Amino acid sequence: MAGKVRRLGILTGGGDCPGLNAVIRAVAKTAFYRYGIEVVGIANGFGGLIENEHFLLNDSHVSGILHRGGTILGTTNRDNPFRYPVGSDNSNPVYGDVSGRAIANLERMGVDVLVVVGGDGSLFIANEFHKKGVPVVGIPKTIDNDLSATDVTFGFDTALNTATDAIDKLHTTAESHHRVMVLEVMGRNAGWIALQSGLAGGADIILIPEIPFSYDSILAKIEARKSRGKRFSIAVVAEGAKLPRGEQVFQEVVKDNPLRNRLGGVAEVVGREIERLSGMETRVTVLGHLQRGGAPTPFDRNLGTRFGVKAVEMAVLREVGRMVCLCSGTIQSASLSDAVAEQKLVRPDSELVRAARSVGTSFGD
Ligand code: F6P
């Protein structure tokens, strides 16, 4: 049996989101003051682990950061130790497995258990390290809320607040100008942000990747509203929503790595088509990275804190290869392999979707 845990490592990987600093603070304070354990902060996600960029955290690093967005450790959604650029061939990058280098760095740092705070990509990598014998505890993070094995990820609630606030603001100007307002929100291939902000903001139309839509159906909704004297409409479109022929819209397509393709632009396409077909003036807003920034909501601060505390408790007990999670309101843990097995998507027949339909929201289907 492995000995007493004396030193933890922590890294934040993937896209940042509000609440990361709350997690780092909770891990550090719990480790320092409850267990007398040291914590090494690894800079810039798995990139820092490969390149050996790290520092010993102390109280002043984690003081005054609870309310701050971003991550004091830095992050990246590019560096995968199992597929890392190691050279180039005719100006094409050549990738290799440098996980051994990362593991050697962890040993040099004297890290007994590594805490990985990340979304599905980072937790997938964490699980690969676990399979290689590295003691790992995961903490689920993403504004997209698309991770299985937890009711919710931290960061989602803050993004939801930002998106709902945007819908509220668009509402008043839509009404004044008798326009259709189309708002594009993030979420990758999951419609959670669009669905829940649309429901909270009273959107007339919500388009999500999980429910195919047609322009006829969108038009029917706008016309039905007009006939009731409502001369404006609000549509919330998830960036991953699929156009009627099934395709998604990308801002950037990465030649040798489709997982890194960047979604974006679907609202512009939908908005143009709505204007052409309905004859109503239409405006498009893309909320973008505003959803990832700013101060975390109290919910995300508290969830991040609870996740951080639980992760240290698990590390001390060597409950590794697992991820902390929120299940039916209580903090628990799940195996990393279950957590990354499949993405958590919106079920079209779920209670949330039925509730939205029940109050008259159209999903364009
Ligand atoms: O996963 C979080 C997220 O914000 C997605 O909603 C979005 O598709 C993606 O990251 C954007 O990534 P980047 O910051 O690389 O543009």
Image (spheres, grey):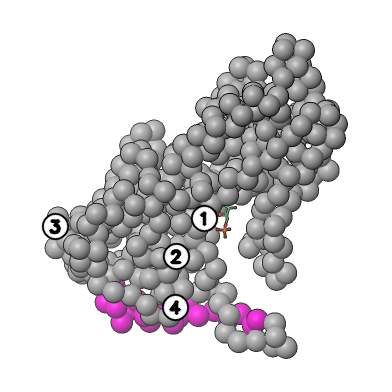
Q: Nearer the viewer, mark 3 or mark 2?
A: 2
What is the C-alpha distance between the residues marked 3 and 2? 26 Å
Residue 72 in the image: above or below residue 361: below
In the image, the segment drawn in magenta is 93-111
Mark closer to the chain start, 4 or 2: 4
Q: Would you call the spot at circle 1 few (<14 residues within 10 Å), some (14-19), or many (20 or more)?
A: many
Identify residue for label 3.
33
Q: Is mark 3 within 8 Å of ligand 1?
A: no
Mark closer to the chain start, 3 or 2: 3
Residue at point 34%, 52% (across, down): 68
Mark closer to the chain start, 3 or 1: 3
Residue 339 in the image: above or below residue 47: above
Amino acid on which the number 2 mark rests in the picture: Thr
What is the C-alpha distance between the residues marked 2 and 1? 15 Å
Identify residue for label 1.
120
Residue 181 in the image: above or below residue 316: above
Mark closer to the chain start, 4 or 1: 4
Q: Nearer the viewer, mark 4 or mark 2?
A: 2
Task: Find residue 190 and report its horizontal and vertical position in percent.
Answer: 60, 43
Q: Would you call the spot at circle 4 few (<14 residues within 10 Å), some (14-19), or many (20 or more)?
A: many
What is the C-alpha distance between the residues marked 3 and 1? 31 Å
Residue at point 61%, 39% (across, down): 191
Identify residue for label 4.
50
